[in-house]
Amino acid sequence: MKKSLLAVAAMTAFAGAAQAQSSVTVYGVLDVGYINQKSDGAGTSATTKANNSFIGSSAEQTSRLGFKGTEDLGGGSSAFFTVETGLQPTNATASAWNNRQSFVGLKKNGTGQFTLGTQYTPVFQALAATDVGQTNNMVGSAVYPQQSAAGNGNPGTAGFAGADGTSGTTNSMTVRTSNTIQAQSDKFAGFSLGAAYTQNATTTTPTTTTETKNNYTGWGVKLDYSWQKLYVVAAMNRLKSENLSPTTTLTTPTPSVWSGAGGGVNTQDNQFYAGGTYDFGILKAYLQYVSRKDTSTLNTNYYAKRSAQQIGVRSYITPTIEGWASWGNGKVTTWGTSAPSANFVAWQAGLNYYLSKRTNVYGIYGANNLSSAAPVNPALNTNAFALGVRHTF
């Protein structure tokens, strides 16, 4: 009888311990506000003027809903997962799952971790850790420009936060990749190293003449260093798409670069980012640089390039009011054999007023001015401001 009671007690204690060691957290962001955006051409090649005002979402931070879970495996090891979808609070018809992140991983304390699934790229992770605007979706960032709501996708032309909450697409880098495995080390003497490899649906189908290939692969690395109030990081992505069939013309590439989160068709997409922050106490200073070159794998005379640098500061003006400002410039070379180039200047300023730890109202204003890249793109001036409320949970 005593043995039975002891066994029951042991099993109960073990079950209780196992339950205590496992946890699931629900988190999210809801960001909604008023957005006004304007654009017009400049110089001798003026474009049509646009002026839009609407109640939109995700100006300061993309709205989302996520789930995180961890399980203690013992001996300093654990298993964990993240599942995160975008939310569209101003879109009454939205029903599709927007997969922002979905991965599972294993971790060993003192060594590091690895994860598998849809994840942020090393370059975007480096940006997120050192971006003065905290990757907001408004006009005015030289290193994280938002694509136009009109979808023109022209490199260097800043766009606007989307009315449907699907913001977060940029011309400067690939934000996330699916079918990805990542490894991240713990800190050693202030350094940590991360790496990623992507393998997407490689297929070969025999035909009467040759094979059809659909291959999306790539890799990335990230190295960062922390010392007291200094943080620096550098990262690169190397992503390649290969879509070859018996009808592919080797001398005429498809000029669809930088559309969506990735590059174009049959392209080698090379991306680099370096950034640093230093906390002076009264304010935090930021320095950022990004470059990208997307080259056709069918004809290397076809390519697009973009590079930019940016400085900024962020500070709590009072215990409840936070402000930031940034200025940056860069150069963009458009897609094509003639590869005309244009210069751009961007700046942004914003304020947060915190009503509580999780709720704030904000105001953001930004502008981007792009010179002419004749004969492909005319000059373009864009500016936008947003007033909104953000709640995190």
Image (cartoon, rainbow, N blue to C red):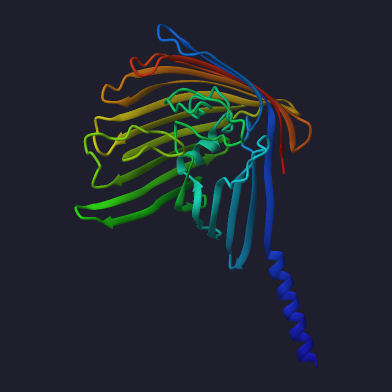
Q: In this view, does 284 lie above or below 267?
A: above
Q: Residue 302's spot in the image, x, y percent?
A: 28, 30
Q: Is residue 390 above or below residue 79?
A: above
Residue 343 visible from this viewpoint: yes
Q: Residue 21's spot in the image, x, y percent?
A: 68, 64
Q: Residue 239's spot in the image, x, y percent?
A: 37, 43
Instruction: Tell which residue pokes out farthest to the bottom in this image.
Output: 1
Left or right of residue 298, residue 83 in this image: right
Foreground residue, 12 or 338? Answer: 338
Image quadrant in which you'd find residue 95:
top right
Left or right of residue 194, residue 53 in this image: right
Foreground residue, 181 or 3? Answer: 181
Q: Which residue is drawn at 75% across and 35% down?
A: 359
Q: In this view, does 363 lie above or below 248?
A: above
Instruction: Tell which residue pokes out farthest to the top in this image.
Output: 44
Instruction: Tell which residue pokes out farthest to the front in this image.
Output: 208
Residue 364 visible from this viewpoint: no
Image quadrant in which you'd find residue 201:
bottom left
In the picture, which quadrant includes the C terminus?
A: top right
In the picture, which quadrant includes the N terminus?
A: bottom right
Foreground residue, 83 or 4? Answer: 83
Instruction: Tell which residue pokes out farthest to the left in this image.
Output: 209
Q: Total label count?
A: 0
Q: Residue at x 30, y 30 (%)?
A: 303
Q: Residue at x 32, y 35 (%)?
A: 254
Q: Residue 367's spot in the image, x, y percent?
A: 55, 18
